[in-house]
C-alpha cells in the first residue's frame, strides 16, 4: 500500500464539488472578510474529509461491481491495492477528524454535515438502487454544501440559490446515470442495479427538461428586482450567456461525446467548461465587487 493509493482512495478530484461551500460568502459580499473566509476554509476542509470517508465506504460496498467497470476497476479497493479493512480504517479516521475539527472550530456546521453523512450512508447501503430517489439524493448533496457554507459565514440562503443549485445538480446526476445506461447497453454488464429503472429516452428527456428549467430559473433570478437590489447590479442578466454555454457544452459532452460519467473530472479536464466557469466568475466579480 502506497501513499498514492491512499490519496487516490480519498478522491481528491471530487473536492471540486465542495467549492459550493464558498458560494454563500461570495454572494453575501463576505469574500474579503477575513473571519468569513477562514470559517469557509475550515468548513471546506472538514467537509472534504467527511466526503472522503463516504467515498471510501461506498467503494468498499461497490468493489464487486466496480471490478467490471472500465474505469472504476482501477480504484484502489476494486483493484486490490488496498484491502477493505484498511480502507475502512482510513474512512473512520477521516470521519472522526472531520467531526473533531467542526466541534472545536465550527460547531454550527455540524448538523448539515451529520445530515449529509446519514443520507449518503443510506444511499450507499440501499437508496442508490432506487430509481429517481438516487439522483435526488445526489442533487441534495450540493444543496447541503450550500447550507454548510451559509452556516459557516452566518448568512441566510435565498430560495433562488437553493432551487437553482438543486436543479443543476439534478441535471448532472441524470447525465451520470445516462453514462451508466450507455455502458450497460454497450457491454452487457450491469454496473449498477439502478439502471433497470432508466433508459436513454427517459434520461434524454429528463436532462432536456432539467437543463431548460435551470436556464429559465437563472434568467428569472438575474432579472429579479429583489436580486438586483441585494447584489447592487442591474446587469446580472449578462452572465446568463455563460450559464447557457455551460449547459449546452455539458449536453454536447453527454449526447454527442457520450462521456458524462464523472462530472468532477469533466470540469477538471474540459477547457471549454473551464473557460465558461472562469468567465462567469469574472463577470460576477466585476458586476458585484467592482461596481464602483
Image (cartoon, rainbow, N blue to C red):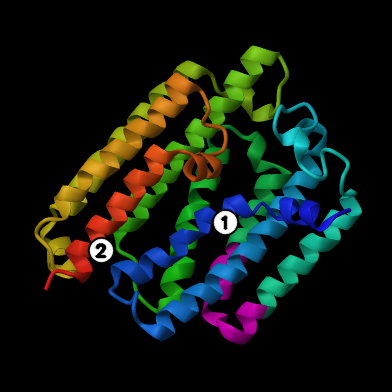
The residue located at (47%, 43%) in the rendering is 267
**Relative depth, front residue between 83 and 171:** 83
Magenta segment includes 15: no
The residue located at (70%, 46%) in the rendering is 124
Residue named by callout 2 = 285
The residue located at (67%, 50%) in the rendering is 122
**Relative depth, front residue between 275 and 266:** 275
Identify the mark at residue 155; answer none if there is no mark: none
Q: Secondary structure at mark 1?
A: helix
Where's the C terminus, which quadrant? Answer: bottom left
Magenta segment includes 106: yes
What span is in magenta? 101-115
Give the prevailing secondary structure in the magenta stretch.
Answer: helix
Identify the mark at residue 15; answer none if there is no mark: 1
**Spot occupied by residue 168 in the image (x, y as percentages of width and height):** 39, 44
Q: Quadrant of residue 235?
A: bottom left
| Local crowd size for mark 2, using a 10 Å CA cut-off: few (<14), some (14–19), many (≥20) | some
**Spot occupied by residue 221 in the image (x, y as percentages of width and height):** 20, 52
**Spot occupied by residue 72 in the image (x, y as percentages of width and height):** 72, 35
Tell me whether the residue at label 1 lies in contact with that at label 2, contact meaning CB atoms closer than 8 angstroms.
Answer: no
In this view, 268 is above or below 249: below
Amino acid at each position: 500500500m502506497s501513499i498514492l493509493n491512499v490519496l487516490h482512495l480519498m478522491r481528491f478530484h471530487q473536492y471540486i464539488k465542495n467549492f459550493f461551500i464558498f458560494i454563500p460568502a461570495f454572494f453575501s459580499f463576505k469574500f474579503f472578510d477575513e473571519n468569513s473566509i477562514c470559517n469557509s476554509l475550515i468548513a471546506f476542509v472538514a467537509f472534504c474529509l467527511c466526503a472522503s470517508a463516504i467515498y471510501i465506504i461506498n467503494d468498499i460496498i461497490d468493489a464487486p461491481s466496480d471490478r467490471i467497470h472500465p474505469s472504476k476497476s482501477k480504484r484502489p479497493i476494486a483493484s486490490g491495492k488496498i484491502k477493505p479493512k484498511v480502507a475502512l480504517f482510513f474512512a473512520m479516521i477521516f470521519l472522526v477528524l472531520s467531526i473533531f475539527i467542526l466541534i472545536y472550530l465550527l460547531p454550527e456546521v455540524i448538523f448539515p454535515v451529520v445530515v449529509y453523512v446519514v443520507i449518503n450512508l443510506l444511499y450507499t447501503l440501499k437508496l442508490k438502487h432506487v430509481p429517481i430517489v438516487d439522483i435526488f439524493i445526489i442533487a441534495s448533496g450540493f444543496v447541503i454544501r450550500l447550507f454548510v457554507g451559509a452556516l459557516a459565514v452566518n448568512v441566510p440562503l435565498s430560495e433562488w440559490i437553493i432551487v437553482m443549485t438543486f436543479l443543476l445538480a439534478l441535471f448532472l446526476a441524470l447525465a451520470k446515470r445516462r453514462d451508466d445506461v450507455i455502458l450497460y447497453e454497450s457491454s452487457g454488464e450491469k454496473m449498477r442495479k439502478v439502471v433497470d429503472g432508466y433508459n436513454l429516452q427517459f434520461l434524454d428527456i429528463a436532462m432536456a427538461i432539467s437543463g431548460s428549467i435551470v436556464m429559465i430559473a437563472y434568467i428569472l433570478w438575474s432579472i429579479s428586482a429583489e436580486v438586483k437590489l441585494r447584489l447592487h447590479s442591474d446587469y446580472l442578466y449578462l452572465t446568463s450567456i455563460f450559464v447557457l454555454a455551460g449547459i449546452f457544452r455539458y449536453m454536447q459532452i453527454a449526447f454527442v461525446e457520450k462521456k458524462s460519467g464523472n462530472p468532477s473530472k469533466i470540469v477538471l479536464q474540459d477547457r471549454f467548461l473551464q473557460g465558461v466557469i472562469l468567465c462567469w466568475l469574472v463577470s460576477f466579480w466585476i458586476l458585484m465587487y467592482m461596481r464602483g
